[in-house]
């Protein structure tokens, strides 16, 4: 009796236990004929027969009551079929009659349900399927009847799942088997009839039920009864031939077959299991191959045997190779942080499938039926195996062990593709050894591409097309991009003359801004080699602009290579194009002059000077940029790195010349006085470019916050002299900002900077005090400063590391030093200028 307050699971387990005990007692009874023989009296025989029939009817009624309450209880029939298969001494024919009647009852009952779920139908169908080919005709008849009703239930359940309206007539009117209920079947069924039954059963069952059926038949292959195992193998083969595409949980089935094969089954059963692998591969190669690659590396003999079987299905060879290529996109030993990314049968989160796929290719590529597919996927296999070889080699360097299956697979690929000479040449050049040596890095990839090119490999067009496609779409990993760039560059070098076709040039231009610095550097190196033909390239302005963007890379090697590339291209670029870009290029050097890396600073400053030298005829285009870089050029004269100082001297000399100033004497000397040089430049600025001095002060303020002491020292001096020259031009709010900035310098940890800051602070304080006078006096003073040019004198007595004297503070002002404070232009102006009488100075102080 079903009780609503009882746990359904506990209730079912209790009922099943009682049914099992009853089943074993009821169907262990001798047959009715034997019971009758034990009695001579006819009345006793009749009573025994009635008792016998009542027992069987009671058992059947019990099942009918249970099923009428809950269709889920049809699972009991599945258990009965299993009990029957375990012990042939039971009254199988009578048990089959009861199973058939209960299924018939359930078939009529399901029509009244809008929905229902009977999960056991697939396993029960497998048991009935086997019994349909029993040697006893009566059992065959009952099994076929039960199968008919079961398939009706399954069909109705499938229609409900598909939101269809299923209408069935009387029993037998829509029989799904080739033998309707009530027709006797011959003791032996032909192969054609078996095939038809398998087709109809597979067609009627839902995928989940069909999977249960296949699983049950697969488990029967290990049965001790050879007849049952053989029949299960036959039915399994027939079912999968027509309906393998409906089977789910293929990974579980493949794993079960692997475990059974490891158990050393009989030769016949082994062949049956391998045939299942072949049929599943034919239906769903991707699922099967994924599972076959998900076992420990190196593969054992059983797994290799399964690989051979999967490879024997020639019609799906392209799909198998596609799946393997998909696996080869992974990185051996890569850890999956996300638990959802782990696979069901993996031992741990470490991905070793790519290594297994490489080993599998050693088995599959030489298969004759794979020849056409190998030719089709040669470029993809070549690049995938090169990446895997690089990964595996790096992993071996780190761990010190591990086979290089990718290397073996790559050599097999070359030999299977008619490139035996390439393989031999690579062996002679110790190519494979280079992959395993850390110092050579990517030289192995370079050597493979070079050797293939030297032998004019026939797959070049397809390989080039694939590399272009791969480059446009973008590889999955940055390491793959490096290999792609190296390989493509080498192929282009061997098969094309510079410049490359525009399509490939665009690739290299895009690679300049790749996130992987190695890719950017390789691309810049290749573009630099195009310098001799730079004027033949279309969109050269776009190419140069992309390289200029690389100046700001976070990786110093990319920035250095970009500087070298631009310089090399500019040496060959025609002057018309050069002049149209000179301002943009010159401005790109400016941020690098204050770079943290000394080599980049020196190169940016040096190359800026070389650009000015190249564009000497177009100086008017660059005057604004020249004046903008004056501040860093002056300040970095005191840099701690000699090469930066030399670059500053070189470029500053060119700037002075282009601006029309006289050359400061100290630039030509190895040791010079920084302060005198600043005074000289400030005087020249005042005379010819005075309107820029306020901007230069603003630029200098930024260096007061520098972490480098020598920049803070030199900026304090420069800003003091600039303020001395143009103090009359500054506004009150500007003076306040500058005073605040200099105030911070008074608290600097460097004592020299403190002393210098005191002098600069006094200069700004003096300028600020002027704002307290009347407006008339301020206007008069401004007018005077515009007309009367003051002679600057050294204020700081600063001696830096590059000065003549050794003393850190204090210099001796000589007569020659005083004379040098005024250049020729300054003297000319003082000598020729006639001042109005009202503006004559009556005292030195005034």
Image (tube, rainbow, N blue to C red):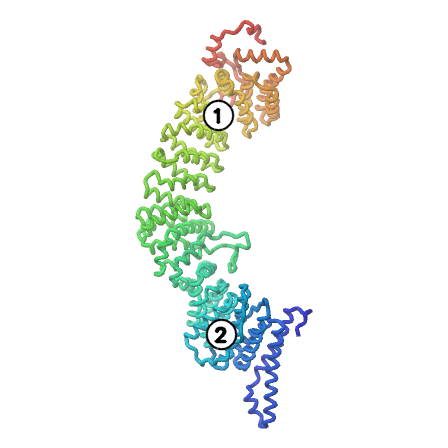
Specify whether 272 is left or right of 63.
left
**Residue at the bottom extreme of this rendering:** 41
Specify whether 638 is left or right of 68.
left
Earlier sequence position, callout 1 versus callout 2: 2
Residue 519 appears in the picture as rendered: yes
**Residue at the top extreme of this rendering:** 837
Residue 633, x across and y down, in percent: 48, 25
Tell me how far mark 1 sits from mark 2, CA to CA.
Answer: 91 Å
**Residue occupying the point 46% across, 13% down:** 825
Specify whether 503 is left or right of 330.
left
Residue 804 appears in the picture as rendered: no
Q: Quadrant of the N terminus?
A: bottom right
**Residue at the right extreme of this rendering:** 5
For the residue pair 247 and 589, the one nearer the viewer reads as 247
Q: Which residue is mark 2?
A: 129
For the residue pair 285 and 651, the one nearer the viewer reads as 285
Q: Is residue 92 above or below residue 707?
A: below
Residue 338, x across and y down, in percent: 55, 52
For the residue pair 797 and 447, the one nearer the viewer reads as 447
Report helix, strand or loop for mark 2.
helix
Residue 480, x across and y down, in percent: 43, 47
Q: Which mark is residue 629?
A: 1
For the residue pair 668 and 345, the one nearer the viewer reads as 345
Asked whether the residues under the numbered discs 1 and 2 touch, taking CB atoms below 8 Å apart as contact, a structural biologist would say no
Report helix, strand or loop for mark 1.
helix
**Residue occupying the point 46% across, 35% down:** 549
Q: Is residue 505 above or below residue 355?
A: above
Q: Is residue 307 above or below residue 673?
A: below
Q: Is residue 785 above or below residue 30?
A: above
């Amino acid at each position: 009796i079903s009780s609503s307050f009882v746990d359904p699971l506990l209730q079912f387990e209790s009922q099943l236990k009682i049914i099992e005990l009853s089943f074993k007692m009821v169907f262990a009874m001798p047959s009715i004929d034997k019971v009758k023989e034990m009695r001579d009296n006819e009345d006793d025989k009749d009573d025994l027969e009635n008792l016998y029939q009542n027992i069987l009817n009671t058992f059947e009624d019990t099942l009918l009551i249970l099923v009428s309450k809950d269709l889920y209880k049809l699972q009991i029939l599945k258990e009965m079929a299993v009990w029957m298969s375990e012990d042939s001494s039971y009254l199988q024919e009578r048990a089959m009659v009861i199973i058939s009647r209960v299924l018939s009852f359930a078939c009529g009952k399901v029509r009244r349900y809008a929905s229902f779920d009977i999960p056991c139908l697939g396993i029960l169908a497998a048991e009935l399927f086997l019994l349909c080919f029993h040697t006893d005709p009566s059992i065959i008849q009952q099994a076929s009847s039960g199968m008919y009703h079961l398939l009706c239930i399954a069909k109705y359940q499938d229609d409900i799942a598909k939101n269809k309206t299923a209408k069935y007539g009387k029993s037998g009117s829509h029989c799904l088997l080739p033998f309707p209920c009530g027709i006797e079947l011959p003791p032996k069924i032909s192969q054609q009839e078996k095939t038809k039954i398998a087709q109809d059963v597979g067609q009627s069952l839902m995928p989940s039920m069909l999977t249960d059926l296949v699983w049950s038949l697969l488990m029967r292959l290990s049965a001790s009864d050879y007849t049952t195992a053989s029949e299960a193998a036959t039915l399994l083969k027939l079912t999968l031939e027509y309906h393998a595409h409906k089977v789910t949980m293929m990974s579980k089935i493949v794993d079960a077959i692997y475990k059974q094969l490891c158990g050393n089954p009989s030769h016949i059963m082994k062949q049956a299991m391998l045939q299942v692998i072949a049929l599943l591969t034919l239906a769903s190669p991707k699922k099967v191959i994924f599972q076959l690659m998900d076992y420990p590396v190196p593969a054992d003999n059983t797994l290799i045997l399964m690989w051979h079987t999967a490879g024997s299905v020639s019609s799906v060879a392209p799909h198998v190779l596609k799946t393997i290529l998909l696996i080869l996109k992974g990185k051996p030993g890569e850890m999956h942080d996300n638990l959802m990314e782990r696979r069901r049968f993996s031992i741990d989160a470490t991905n070793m499938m790519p290594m297994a796929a490489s080993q599998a290719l050693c088995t599959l590529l030489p298969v004759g039926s794979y020849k056409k597919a190998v030719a089709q996927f040669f470029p993809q296999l070549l690049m995938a195996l090169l990446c895997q070889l690089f990964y595996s080699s790096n992993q071996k360097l780190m761990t010190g062990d591990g086979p290089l299956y990718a290397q073996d697979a790559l050599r097999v690929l070359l030999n299977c593709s008619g490139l035996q000479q390439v393989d031999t040449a690579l062996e002679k050049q110790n190519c494979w050894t280079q992959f395993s040596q850390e110092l050579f890095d990517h030289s192995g990839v370079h050597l493979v591409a070079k050797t293939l090119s030297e032998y004019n490999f026939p797959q070049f067009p397809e390989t080039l097309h694939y590399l272009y496609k791969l480059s446009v779409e973008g590889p999955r990993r940055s390491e793959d991009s490096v290999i792609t760039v190296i390989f493509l560059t080498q192929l282009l070098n061997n098969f094309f003359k510079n410049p490359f076709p525009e399509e490939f040039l665009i690739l290299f231009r895009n690679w300049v801004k790749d996130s992987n610095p190695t890719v950017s550097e390789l691309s810049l190196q290749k573009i630099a080699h195009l310098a001799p033909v730079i004027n033949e390239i279309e969109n050269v302005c776009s190419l140069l602009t992309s390289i200029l963007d690389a100046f700001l890379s976070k990786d110093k090697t990319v920035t250095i290579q970009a500087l070298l590339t631009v310089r090399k291209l500019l040496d060959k670029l025609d002057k018309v194009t050069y002049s149209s870009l000179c301002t943009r290029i010159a401005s790109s050097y400016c941020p690098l002059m204050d770079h943290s890396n000394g080599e980049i600073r020196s190169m940016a400053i040096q190359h800026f000077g070389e650009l000015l030298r190249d564009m000497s005829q177009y100086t008017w285009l660059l005057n604004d940029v020249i004046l903008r870089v004056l501040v860093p050029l002056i300040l970095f004269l005191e840099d701690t790195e000699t090469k930066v100082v030399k670059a500053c001297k070189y470029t500053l000399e060119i700037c002075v010349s282009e601006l029309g100033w006289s050359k400061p004497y100290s630039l030509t000397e190895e040791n010079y006085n920084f302060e005198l040089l600043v005074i000289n430049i400030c005087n020249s600025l005042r005379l010819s470019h005075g309107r820029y001095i306020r901007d230069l002060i603003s630029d200098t303020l930024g260096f007061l916050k520098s972490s480098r002491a020598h920049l803070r020292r030199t900026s304090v001096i420069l800003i003091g002299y600039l303020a001395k020259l143009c103090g009359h031009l500054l506004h009150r709010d500007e003076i306040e900002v500058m005073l605040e900035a200099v105030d911070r310098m008074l608290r600097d940890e460097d004592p020299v900077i403190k002393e210098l800051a005191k002098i600069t602070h006094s200069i700004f304080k003096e300028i600020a005090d002027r704002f307290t006078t009347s407006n008339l006096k301020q206007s008069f003073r401004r007018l005077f400063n515009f007309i009367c040019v003051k002679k600057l004198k050294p204020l700081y007595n600063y001696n830096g590391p590059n000065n003549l004297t050794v003393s850190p503070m204090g210099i001796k002002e000589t007569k020659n030093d005083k004379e040098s404070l005024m250049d020729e232009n300054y003297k000319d102006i003082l000598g020729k200028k006639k001042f109005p009488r009202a503006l004559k100075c009556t005292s030195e102080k005034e």
